[in-house]
Image (cartoon, helix red, strand yellow):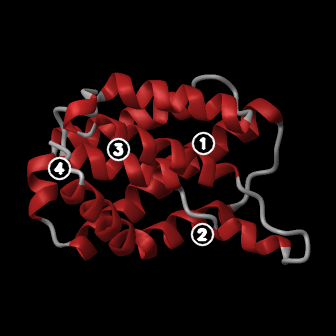
Amino acid sequence: MNPAQGGWVILLTVVLAMLASIVHLPESWPAWLGWWRPVWVPLVLFFWVVEVPHRVGLIAAWIVGLALDVLVADPLGINGALLACLTFFTWRFYERLRMFAVLQQGLLLLVLLSVYELLRSLVLAWVRGDAFSWAVLLGPLFSAFLWPFVYMFLQRLRTGFRVA
């Protein structure tokens, strides 16, 4: 990522998304609200791959996924592999995805993030022996709902800092 062309903006947004992934709710709030936590890192990576596919690719997504594995204490490679798969799909069809309306992109994200979270949960249930719950689909649902706002915010950052 070339800092002269806004590479630092891409890196900063990914780091902020990673930090938002580990923020805990206050103890006074009900525990079930944690299921509605958006899936921040795939959202931000999806945006950057669609908007500047020549700047964010499979290796960057894999490295971000490995860092996310370390950050959230998942077995090494789960998020890296899943983010690389998500990035490959997005990278393969980014020209079509650019033509979609933001709401259509949100519906596609609902499907992609649901598959991402289901696979992640199944692997964690298998590796750690955790109980599987369908409640993991609430995060992707809320993420798809937030997508238009995330898109507008990141698009303003992209144009404001001239990320090319």
Callout 1 amino acid? Arg
Callout 3 amino acid? Val
Q: Which label sits in the foreground, 2 or 3?
A: 3
| Residue 87 seen anywhere in this rendered image of the structure | yes
Q: Earlier in the sequence, mark 4 or mark 3?
A: 3
Rendered position, 56 above or below 155: above
Q: Mark 1 and mark 3: span between their CA atoms?
A: 28 Å
Q: Mark 1 and mark 4: span between their CA atoms?
A: 35 Å
Q: Which label sits in the foreground, 1 or 4?
A: 4
Relative image position of residue 133 (x, y in whole percent): 72, 59
Q: Residues within 10 Å of mark 2 (few under 14, many from 20)?
A: many
Callout 2 amino acid? Leu
Q: Mark 2 and mark 3: span between their CA atoms?
A: 29 Å
User: In the rendered image, which residue does mark 2 sit on?
Assistant: 138
Q: Earlier in the sequence, mark 2 or mark 3?
A: 3
Q: Earlier in the sequence, mark 1 or mark 4?
A: 1
Q: Are marks 2 and 1 in contact (CB under 8 Å)?
A: no
Q: Nearer the viewer, residue 26 or 8?
A: 8
Which structural element holds mark 3? helix
Q: Which label sits in the foreground, 4 or 2?
A: 4
User: In the rendered image, which residue does mark 4 sit on?
Assistant: 162
Classify the position of the N terminus by image quarter.
top left
The dot on residue 120 is: 1
Q: Mark 4 and mark 3: span between their CA atoms?
A: 10 Å
Which quadrant would residue 86 be assigned to in this image? top left
Left or right: residue 77 compared with residue 157? right
Q: Earlier in the sequence, mark 2 or mark 1?
A: 1
Relative image position of residue 134 (x, y in whole percent): 66, 63
Seen as rendered, the residue at the extreme right is 28
